[in-house]
């Protein structure tokens, strides 16, 4: 009896949760719970705060207010699908799922529904080939750029010779963590270094055996593809086995403040690659403080402003807003559709002058999206953690990656996908 | 008044031993089937399919599978997630190796592959039982997940280890891949669920089911009355794994379309299916459905109420969801240890006496 009542209530609740048509709907598939929340919260806060800023300061984009519909995924693909289905009916313009697993699900679905997906520095790397992945954008850089950027940095610091060196890759044993393996293997062949693979299973709290192996084999460098709680554990374990921190480089998802803070002074010198600026020394932060934080409209608890992942969320929101502006300009109407936005994203051009006008001068590299290239130019910099000042600072500027190796891999992987799914070339 | 045996005369043995001996039950059963087949396909949309109906149907099959093993044969298993992974990866390999094969055969074959794997991991049950068997099946869970991560052949050497379901059609309508219609996917899942549930119901009523239950209740006594423990236990493992494998295959091709083993088929999945069976009711096919409905609907309902209606922050709602679902599980287990199926049985008893209770 109880159950039938509950079922009736369920039906009623689901029906009444029907979509509300609003102006410019930007869903935020966030995760503020679970083992990956440490990374999910600042990103979601930055994403939401920038959109709030646009609403508060500029009155929306082109006169249309932005409506953010947040949906908790918990980094779980099943919940991600539910969130996608629940939000797409509202007229969602663009998805930013912040999960490689959810991205893989959304690629075919969003393509069929004509909604663009922007995967900023994550997701399926071969989606850079816009000829095959028409609705997926991973500008300004992807995982393989990250891997190559790391190797380039090592080359730079070793007088262009890393042959005979050993490099260990500590990675999250999932689609996300496996992405760089093939690139690193290819680069290993090219530059003559030896690669050791050390997978860490979800959620990543248990890494004793991996670091014991590192202690025993003493690789020259350790690279890491970690996310969530795995990062802090890895940095702590590296400190425990006294691995020199300056030889430990993480991907941009392993380079946030909360990843290194728990290890305290031992984390000093840890490095991570990045594709955007660090810190809050940009004019846009004054506006965020004035219009969002001080007005009490900050997302979450408002304590993540200026952190690495907050910046990244803000960057993602900025790129989305710029694309919306382009779409409005191209169509001549303010109330654009997801399809209009996709077309605009395909022609998006971010220049230094444009970032300057937004109060983000020098924040990220310049790039231009084309039909064939949905991934930007893949410029990668390196940031280093200073444990006494508790700040990240850029120690290597945004530099190009090994496109010779990466482009071949992208071509191979995307063509395999195109063949499996009968996708025809559309760019010519 | 409506729910009574009186006046419903059985003149054949077949009539007497049918699944629903009471007329009202029979009509209700046909009414539910008619609604599911004739009404739902016309009203279902993507949200209902992917957020509610499809997970419910797929988890129901998995719960029936585990119920056969745990509820009917008394062998505790924590390996359901691993067996679902076997179904999904078998399905993927069949789909990519034999592109001409239709989706029904692919899913069925995946079930048979899983059944074989299930027999293999069921062998320890001949010697160990109870908690020790649970640990042995836990080993199956971890081993299978590790295997599908480790051996690239299973995911066709793709860079990320993800498997993606290519498009397949039934009578010209796409049921897997991107261009699917909600009703088509729903009908494929529904056909599997109905057929499998009917088969399971009849298996458990027949001699095989009686053997399982004899083993469950007291294995030594069962052996003395002539039940072969080896065939009974291994058949339970095989049939249970067949069901779980089919649910895994459907989970992959119909529901998610792209999975990676550690995330989709981890130990959490085994626990969820076990919870479904326990909350729904051990040793009951209806209980499997009720348990699956509880575990699938509850979070969606709570989320829609707390975020959609009350406008709470999403993280607060997600945390409350854990608290409420966890609390409800405890309440159910205390108030009704035999699960939702027992509530349903009691309701039927009361209905039978209504309106003149003792």
Image: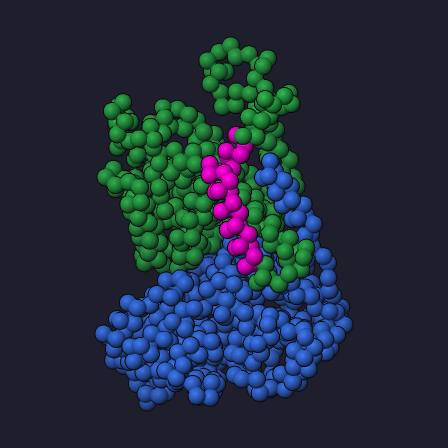
In magenta segment, residue A207 = no
Q: Position of residue B306 (x, y in %)?
A: 63, 56
Q: Residue at point 34% right, 65% down?
A: A206
Residue farthest to the top, as pictured: B11
Along the horizontal axis of the image, is B138 left or right of B336? left
Q: Is residue B303 above or below residue B58?
A: below
In magenta segment, residue B331 = yes
Q: Which image quadrant is residue B8 in?
A: top right
Q: Which chain is blue?
A: A
Assign the N terminus of chain B to one quadrant of the image: top right
Q: Residue at point 36% right, 23% down?
A: B207
Foreground: A387 or A96? A387
Residue B308 can be seen in this image: yes
Q: Position of residue B44 (x, y in %)?
A: 63, 43
Q: Position of residue B41 (x, y in %)?
A: 62, 39
Way the structure is coloured: by chain
Along the horizontal axis of the image, is B14 left or right of A65? left
Foreground: A303 or B259? A303
Residue B30 can be seen in this image: no
Q: Position of residue A117 (x, y in %)?
A: 57, 64
Instruction: Kindly report the secondary structure that dominates the magenta region of the rendered protein.
Output: helix
Along the horizontal axis of the image, is A383 left or right of A189? right
Residue farthest to the front, as pictured: B358
Q: Which chain is green?
A: B
Q: Which image quadrant is residue B262 in?
A: bottom left
Q: Which image quadrant is residue A175 in?
A: bottom left
Please report the bounds of the magenta region as a residue range: B318-345
């Amino acid at each position: 009896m109880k159950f039938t009542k509950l079922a009736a209530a369920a039906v009623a609740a689901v029906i009444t949760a029907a979509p509300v048509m609003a102006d410019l709907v930007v869903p935020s598939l966030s995760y503020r719970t679970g083992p990956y929340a440490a990374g999910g919260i600042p990103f979601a806060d930055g994403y939401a705060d920038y959109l709030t800023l646009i609403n508060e300061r500029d009155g929306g984009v082109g006169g249309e207010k932005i409506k953010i519909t947040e949906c908790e995924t918990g980094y779980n693909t099943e919940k991600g699908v539910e969130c996608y289905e629940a939000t797409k009916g509202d007229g969602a313009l663009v998805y930013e799922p912040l999960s490689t697993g959810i991205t893989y699900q959304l690629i075919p679905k969003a393509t069929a529904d004509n909604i663009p997906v922007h995967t900023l520095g994550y997701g399926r790397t071969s989606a850079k080939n816009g000829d095959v992945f028409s609705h997926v954008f991973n500008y300004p850089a992807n995982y393989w750029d990250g891997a190559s950027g790391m190797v380039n940095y090592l080359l730079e610091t070793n007088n262009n010779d890393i042959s005979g060196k050993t490099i260990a890759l500590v990675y999250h044993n999932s689609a996300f963590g496996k992405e760089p393996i093939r690139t690193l293997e290819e680069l290993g062949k090219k530059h003559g270094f030896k690669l050791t693979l050390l997978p860490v299973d979800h959620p990543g709290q248990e890494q004793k055996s991996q670091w014991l192996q590192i202690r025993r084999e003493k690789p020259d460098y350790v690279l890491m593809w970690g996310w969530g709680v795995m990062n802090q554990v890895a940095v702590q374990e590296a400190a425990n086995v006294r691995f020199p921190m300056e030889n430990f480089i993480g991907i941009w998802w392993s380079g946030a403040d909360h990843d290194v803070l728990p290890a305290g002074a031992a984390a000093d010198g840890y490095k991570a690659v990045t594709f955007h600026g660090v810190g809050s020394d940009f004019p846009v932060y004054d506006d965020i403080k004035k219009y969002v934080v001080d007005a009490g409209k900050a997302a979450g608890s408002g304590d993540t402003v200026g952190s690495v992942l907050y910046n990244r969320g803000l960057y993602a929101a900025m790129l989305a807003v710029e694309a919306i502006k382009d779409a409005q300009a191209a169509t001549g109407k303010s109330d654009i559709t997801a399809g209009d936005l996709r077309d605009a994203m395909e022609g998006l051009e971010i220049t230094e002058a444009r970032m300057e006008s937004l109060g983000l001068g020098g924040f990220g590299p310049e790039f231009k999206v084309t039909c064939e290239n949905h991934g930007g130019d893949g410029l990668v910099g390196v940031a280093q953690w200073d444990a006494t000042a508790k700040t990240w600072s850029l120690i290597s500027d945004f530099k190009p990656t090994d496109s010779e190796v990466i482009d071949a891999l992208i071509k191979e992987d995307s063509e395999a996908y195109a063949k499996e799914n009968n996708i025809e070339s559309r760019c010519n | 008044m409506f729910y009574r045996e009186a006046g419903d005369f059985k003149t054949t043995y077949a009539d007497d031993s049918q699944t629903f001996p009471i007329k009202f039950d029979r009509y209700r059963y046909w009414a539910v089937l008619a609604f599911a087949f004739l009404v739902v396909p016309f009203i279902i949309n993507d949200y209902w399919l992917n957020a509610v109906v499809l997970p419910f149907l797929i988890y129901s099959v998995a719960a029936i599978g585990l119920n056969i093993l745990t509820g009917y044969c008394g062998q505790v298993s924590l390996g359901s997630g691993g067996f679902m992974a076997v179904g999904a990866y078998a399905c993927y390999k069949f789909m990519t190796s034999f592109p001409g094969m239709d989706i029904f055969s692919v899913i069925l074959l995946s079930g048979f592959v899983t059944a074989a794997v299930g027999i293999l991991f069921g062998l320890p049950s001949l010697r160990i039982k109870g908690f020790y068997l649970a640990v042995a099946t836990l080993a199956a869970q971890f081993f299978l997940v590790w295997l599908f991560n480790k051996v690239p052949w299973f995911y066709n050497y793709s860079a990320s280890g993800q498997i993606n379901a290519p498009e397949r059609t039934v009578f010209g309508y796409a049921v897997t891949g991107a261009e699917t219609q909600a009703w088509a996917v729903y009908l494929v899942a529904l056909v599997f669920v109905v057929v499998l549930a009917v088969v399971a119901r009849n298996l458990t009523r027949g001699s095989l089911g009686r053997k399982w239950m004899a083993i469950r209740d007291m294995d030594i006594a069962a052996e003395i009355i002539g039940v072969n423990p080896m065939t009974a236990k291994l058949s339970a493992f095989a049939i249970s794994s067949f069901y779980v494998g089919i649910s895994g295959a459907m989970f992959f091709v119909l529901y998610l379309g792209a999975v990676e083993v550690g995330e989709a088929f981890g130990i959490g999945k085994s626990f969820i299916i076990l919870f479904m069976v326990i909350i729904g009711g051990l040793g009951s096919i209806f209980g499997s459905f009720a348990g699956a409905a509880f575990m699938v609907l509850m979070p969606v309902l709570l989320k829609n109420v707390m975020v959609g209606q009350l406008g709470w922050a999403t993280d607060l709602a997600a945390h409350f969801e854990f608290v409420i679902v966890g609390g409800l599980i405890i309440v159910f287990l205390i108030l009704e240890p035999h699960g939702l199926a027992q509530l349903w049985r009691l309701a039927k008893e009361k209905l039978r006496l209504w309106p003149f209770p003792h």
